[in-house]
Image (cartoon, rainbow, N blue to C red):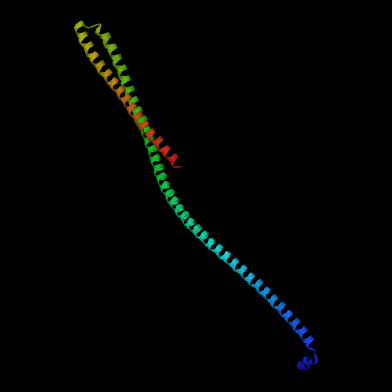
Amino acid sequence: MVRDLEQSKSPSSNESMLTKLRQRLKEKESALEQALDEKFAAIEEKDNEIHQLQLLFREKERDLDRLNNLLSHNEETINDFDSLIKEKDVELQHLANTLKNLQRAKQDVEDNLNRSLREKDSIIHQLQLSLEGKTKDMEEMADKLLNQSQTHARDLAEQMGQRLKVTETMLSEAVKARERLIVDNESAVEGLLATISSKDHLLKVSF
């Protein structure tokens, strides 16, 4: 049928049809090339996007590695601080116990000092009473001496003088012993207070 159609057409008509067909073919080829170019351009653009994403992914991986390293370092630092804090807690507890012991020792020293002072005061009071008694005896004996011979009176006076010296010596020694005890205990208390002050300073520094 096509052959009959071709035979029925004139040569000029065939030529015109071929020209149109060639033109349409060129248009199709041009459109195809353009479509292929656009497709390749789109593919190239996607490849570039993929490449950029891969670069970004690698950069993110490096950032993640750096963050992991930093986190690991921070964990080590935190562990070191935890250990240091535990050591400080132990040291602080030791200092607190030492301070309590020193305060207890200070209280004991003060109690001993007060007890010793009370004992010395009692001894001094007894000696004072004894001295007053001796003085009264001496006054009574002096009255008796007025009625006795001068020689006998001198002997009695010497005896009473010796007794009085002994009593005064005992009283003086007791007073000196009391003063030495006060000085010694004050020195001990001052030493304890200095030690406690030093421990208080260490506790404040530790906090």
Q: Nearer the viewer, residue 87 or 99?
A: 87
* In-image side of 69 versus 162 (left or right): right
Residue with the most extreme front position = 12
* In-image side of 146 versus 35 (left or right): left
Give x and y (percent) for residue 132: 32, 16
Give x and y (percent) for residue 198: 40, 36
* In-image side of 28 versus 162 (left or right): right
Q: Nearer the viewer, residue 107 or 46?
A: 46
Please report the residue visible at 74 percent of the width from the left and 79 percent of the height from the top.
23
Give x and y (percent) for residue 60: 54, 61
Give x and y (percent) for residue 102: 38, 38
Please report the residue visible at 27 percent of the width from the left and 9 percent of the height from the top.
142
Q: Is residue 190 above or below residue 155?
A: below
Q: Nearer the viewer, residue 30 or 172?
A: 30
* In-image side of 20 versus 182 (left or right): right
> The N terminus lies in which quarter of the figure?
bottom right
Q: Nearer the viewer, residue 124 or 73?
A: 73
Q: Is residue 195 above or below residue 56?
A: above
Number of on-image labels? 0
Q: Is residue 81 above or below residue 100?
A: below
Q: Is residue 95 above or below residue 153?
A: below
Residue with the most extreme left position = 151
Please report the residue visible at 41 percent of the width from the left and 39 percent of the height from the top.
202
